[in-house]
Image (spheres, helix red, strand yellow):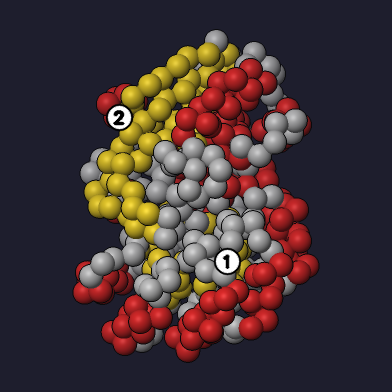
Amino acid sequence: MIIEEVNLYKLNMRMKHPFTTSFGTEQNRGFILVQVKSDSGLTGWGECVTTESPLYIEEFTDSSWLMLEKFLIPAILKKNIDHPDQLQDGFRPYKRNHLAKSALEGAIWDLYAKSKNIPLSKALGGTKQTIEVGVSLGIEKDIDHLLNNIKDKTEEGYKRIKIKIKPGKDVEVIAEVRNHFPDIPLMVDANSAYTLEDVNTLKQMDQFNLMMIEQPLTAGDLIDHAKLQKEITTPICLDESIHSFENARQAIELGSGKIINLKIGRVGGLTQAIKIHDLCSRENIPMWCGGMLESGVGRAHNIAITSLANFTLPGDTASSSRYWDRDIIQPEVQVENGILHVPEAPGIGFEVDIDEVLRNTRTSKCFK
């Protein structure tokens, strides 16, 4: 495939409801779509799952745009690419910037799968036709609102409930949830809000039969997580600490956690995601695919990677309608009783609604 053209679209989409974590509250999603076109006339799509500010990791929407424009797109434009794995060598000189790398690589993977006339899931080595999904619920000021949300989502059939926590909004909230829902599969996500000084608070969570506590300590940390895992019985799931295959390998060797949440953007793309999946499979570390409040393009890539065999725990890829009045793909992602069907059409398996993309676009640029 010769890459003839790359288009960037900077979108701003308003979510149906505010989403609050320990980082803050978000309702307007500013992110980037990447469109690549080959000499055969095929088109591939990727999503840069940034936020407007560098709160989750160091990247943010404007920095990723600059990285794509100045370094990554010139590295592939007019180049002949036989397989998406080739991008790893071209991108290696540029440090980090994983979200930007992942967006462009994801578009190439979509293009590659379409050139082979196979679903992206099959191109990645996926074997599953259906996947189980859970739902992620933000921090609420009103506990009754959270309880009603959980009731609604369990009735909709989601296979796991995740609630966000932070100091002051943790043990009492979990206790109230367990009082009303003693048997649901429940996990909590701290988004790095705690330190080892909070070990007594974190130990109290052991009584609630949680599936896991996600990323309780500092992003990037492996040593203190290993210390904490020895102090608590609840499995630690690592998120912001896993940015590469090497991070995953070191975390497993140190015993920093018992579960890994994989986000394609965070680890730099689908090629790295496959390597991490295979490592975790060999080491018997369960995995699931986390969400970044993606549009339908990002959700499609999440569905594809989750079709790999070692994604054994329900992920965060909820229905499009959970977040958007109208998504930018057709058909929209639809969860039925907690189950998603893996698309069988070539590439990501969804059609991008270019009119809806343009309606939400604030800035665009074409590279030829």
Q: Residue furthest front?
A: 197
Percent across and percent down for residue 38 are 57, 18
Label 2 sits on what residue type?
A: Asn
Residue 77 in picture, x, y percent from top left: 62, 16
Q: Taking 25 as reference, is 67 left or right?
A: right
Nearest the viewer among 259 and 19 is 19
In whole angstroms, how far apart are the C-alphas of marks 1 and 2?
36 Å
Q: Residue tagged by mark 1?
A: 217
Q: What is the number of the mark on residue 270?
A: none
Depicted 80 relative to depicted 295: above or below: above
Return the residue nearer the eye: 277 or 292.
292
Element type at mark 2? helix
Tell me which numbered mark, 1 or 2, is placed earlier along the sequence.
1
Can residue 115 be seen here? The reply is no
Q: Is residue 89 visible?
A: yes
- Residue farthest to the top, as pictured: 368
Q: Which residue is mark 2?
A: 360
Q: Is residue 297 left or right of residue 274?
A: left
Above or below residue 221? Residue 161 is: below
Tell me the quadrant of the picture where the N terminus can be found: top right
**Closer-to-camera residue (290/86):** 290
Where is residue 200 drawn, in percent x and y?
53, 84
Question: Which of the 4 image quarters holds residue 157?
Answer: bottom left
Examine the rendered structure and indicate whether residue 164 appears above or below residue 122. Answer: below
Task: Name the residue: 42% across, 68% down.
Answer: 166
Which three-letter amino acid code belongs to the residue tagged 1?
A: Leu
